Image (spheres, rainbow, N blue to C red):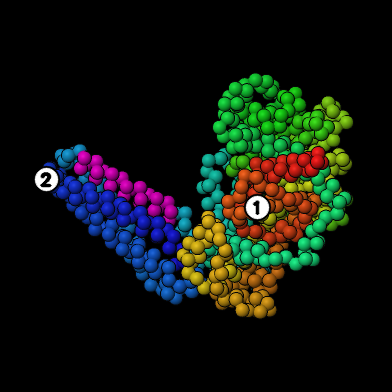
Amino acid sequence: SRHFPLPAVTVVISRPGRWIGILVLYTVHKGQFNCPGGGLLHSYLLGLLILLASIICALSALVYVSMQGTISNPGPRKSLPKILYTRLLLYFPEFIWAVVGAVWVSDNSVQCEKTVINGVIGTVIASWIIIVFTIIGVVIVFDPLGGKKTFYLPDGVSRNLESSQSGQLLYNVKSSATRVWEKRIRLLCCCIVQDDDHRVAFTSIAELFRNYFSDTDLVPSDIAAGLILLHQEQDKMENCPKEPEEVLCHSPSSLVTDDLDAELENAAHYMLFAAAAYGWPYYVYTNPYTALCKLNGDCCRNRPTDSDITGSDRHNFHFGSILKITGLQYRDFIHISFHNKIYEIPFFVALDHKKEAIVVAVRGTLSFEDILTDLSADCEDLTLEEVLENGFVHKGITQAANYIYRKLINDGILNQAFTIAPEYKLVIVGHSLGGGTASILAIMLRNSFPTLRCYAFSPPGGLLSKSLADYTKHFIVSVIVGKDLVARLSMPNMEDLKRRIVRIVANCNRPKYQILLRGCWYEVFGGDPDDFPTELDGRNQDALTQPLLAEESLMVHRSPSYNALEEESHLNSPPQYPRLYLPGKIIHIVEECSSRRLCSSDIKYTARWSNETVFSSILISPKMITDHMPDVVLKALNSLSQEHGSCLSC
């Protein structure tokens, strides 16, 4: 009952337009239905007008009632189910009338003017299109679990009841939920070839989604409203003046600044290799007007032999784009792989004569297979002699790193590279998924190549346990821009975001449509954050640690997330998903801009060494996605590198 305003408003806006169009058609051709079979067409249009008017009235009532009350106060919306059932009943005559219209229009005995017949055919086709899209929408939105997903038992009780009826019921509910998510994932990935690895990944990802969504009663519009409220609350806090001590603690020493400038210069150089790993999609994206012409002119030259390249590169576009982006020659490439499956991602190995390095560049997410690798977020053990504690790593990304490790070592690719350039150092780079894979690959190769360096650009946040993250500070540098979502993405952070959304949405005293409308205005045009009154206002800090009644209506009682609301344990996480961190030392680049929404083309950036705890919470921003894009990262690094160069010349 909380989710009806948005889809219903959309339909209410579109239906009157269709009703008016049919009315115009009926009025204009009213005197032309005297032909053979014209009575049937006349009856169809008249019946359709009456039916559409009834549907519009039902939808208008749905919208009006849905807009009453607040998200957690459904009392004013208690009549909504009756109106909804009325609307559902109207689907039957709508479907029957569409069938009747199709039969009458296709009847050869109808001998009316062609314009009349074409107009009626148009209305019949429109009716069927609406029916088909309605069925698709119901299939997507419908939750076959219904109220079953709200059944929870505490862990201790569930263990004691494993052999009992209640324990069996809990197991059946969880299994049903996993199967539902697995079917949805299979449907989304229906276009890719599926093998055993895919089936294992589907089950793992389905369990992840089941664990995350099973304990809340949030609909998509609730989540949108929560993100809007959190963004405005976050902006209010950012606008508050900082304490002098807080400003002083970020003033770096000259030694740290020199080290940072050197790393920024290296990062700007190696980011070209990480971006080039994306091939032609990145090159076309950054050069939309000239890329295709350049690639068509150059890509057929110097095509590598089959032994140098694996995987499909139709028309040589990928390799041609890599040459353009890096500025290297064909002879500088040792190995290029465009092979892409789940847990197997493309990479290339090249000689960088400018920095005297052998560069291994790993591609980021660019396919459905890569997304499945990203979402395989279970934890695996990675034990190292240098690390006393057992290290945990992201399962999917670790398997991708294992694949590249086997290629580099078992196939002799690195031996071949060091035979050509024995004095060169090894550098591993990547962006996004590639950055995470490069980091774990660097850990695996560290014993064999003690001087190696790794530059991970915008790597995923849930990557390494604390012991491994500390170990990698000696040879890995992570580069994060702004409020990048992926760098803050981990299961504990997602649980924290869910709890924050539940808390702020459940206790806001405004109707959801007001939150969404004002939020859209704020995101597009800016201005001051709205001061939405909530039940949290005026409560002392001790009281805020206890969930309110409104939160109980949105968070299933006795669920893990509900208990976490009571404990307010931000750093705690389920055993299956322990807290993982970014790899290595972290450079955080922040955009400086006087205008909040519309920045000038001359954007300035600042960079500083940061700590992994800074990325322990997801920040809401219109740029949380764009800050992750490789072209934005490269632009920021180039800007800082050029600024440092101009300062040195001065």
> In screen coordinates, is 552 left or right of 390?
left
Give the crowd class for mark 2: few <14, some 14-19, many >=20 residues within 10 Å.
few
State the residue lying farthest toward the front.
Answer: 650
Would residue 119 be counted in the magenta stretch? yes
State the residue lying farthest toward the top.
Answer: 301
Would residue 62 be counted in the magenta stretch? no
By secondary structure, the bulk of the magenta-drawn segment is best described as helix
Q: Viewer-proximal residue, 634 or 49?
A: 634
Q: Secondary structure at mark 2?
A: loop
Residue 446 sits in quarter: top right
Can residue 137 be seen here? The reply is yes
Residue type, numbered disc 2:
Asn
Residue located at (40% from left, 60% from top): 8
Q: Is residue 562 above or below residue 286?
A: below
2 or 1: mark nearer the eye: 1
Can residue 156 be seen here? The reply is no
* Marker disc for residue 460: none
Residue type, numbered disc 1:
Cys
Q: Is residue 275 above or below residue 590?
A: above
* Marker disc for residue 34: 2
Q: What number of labels is visible? A: 2
Residue under label 1, please give it.
593
Residue located at (65% from left, 52% from top): 593
x and y percentages locating residue 26 in the rendered image = 20, 50
Q: Is residue 466 above or below residue 632?
A: below
Quarter of the C terminus within the rendering? top right
x and y percentages locating residue 539 in the rendered image = 63, 79
x and y percentages locating residue 372 in the rendered image = 62, 47
User: Which of marks 1 and 2 precedes in the sequence?
Assistant: 2
Q: Secondary structure at mark 1?
A: loop
The residue segment tinted magenta is 115-138
Give the crowd class for mark 1: few <14, some 14-19, many >=20 residues within 10 Å.
some
